[in-house]
Amino acid sequence: MKKILILSLALSLLGLVPHPSTAGPAAPATAGPAADGSLTVFDLNTVNYDELVSLRGIGPTLAERILEYRAGRGSFARLDQLLEVKGVGEKNFARFKEYFTLTSPPSPVAKTTPHTPR
């Protein structure tokens, strides 16, 4: 949990994610089958925490793990990579894979080298 807090603070400082205190009200949950039978689908490489927890079968802990996985390893190249996230088994994956797509191209994980003092 501490890692997530630090990561979200760092992202908000960089302007990549709005800080929770400046963010507007959360959008209503729209994931899943709509009244007309259509299905709301999220891009797995851009989906955010609120969208994840709005899905049936994904709670706060699993949403955090999915976002940590994506932050640590880069974008998903295949939907079945969700199976590599702790807590996503075959049953869960089968239950909610229909809610995701991959429309954004995978981005490589940023390569960093350890800082060595001079």
Image (cartoon, rainbow, N blue to C red):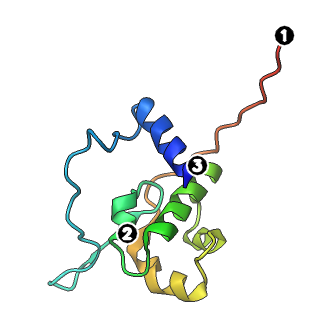
User: Quadrant where the C terminus lies?
Assistant: top right
Q: Is residue 23 left or right of residue 117?
A: left
Pinpoint residue 23: horizontal percent, then vertical percent: 26, 43
Q: Nearer the viewer, residue 11 or 38?
A: 11
Task: Say which residue label 2 marks.
Answer: 53
User: Which element carries disc 1, helix, strand or loop?
Assistant: loop
* Front disc: 2 or 3: 3
The residue carrying pointer 3 sits among few (fewer than 14), some (14 to 19) or many (20 or more) residues within 10 Å by Cα, namely few
Task: Say which residue label 1 marks.
Answer: 118
Q: Amino acid at mark 1?
A: Arg
Q: Nearer the viewer, residue 44 or 1?
A: 1
User: Which element carries disc 2, helix, strand or loop?
Assistant: helix
Sooner in the amino-acid sequence: mark 2 or mark 3: 3
* Front disc: 1 or 3: 3
Identify the residue shown where x is 43% and y is 58%: 103
Task: Say which residue label 3 marks.
Answer: 3
**36 over 55 or under it: above or below:** below
Pinpoint residue 22: horizontal percent, then vertical percent: 26, 38
Sooner in the amino-acid sequence: mark 1 or mark 3: 3
Q: State the image quarter where residue 26 is shown.
A: bottom left
Identify the residue shown where x is 59% and y is 76%: 87
Q: CA distance from mark 2 to mark 3?
A: 19 Å
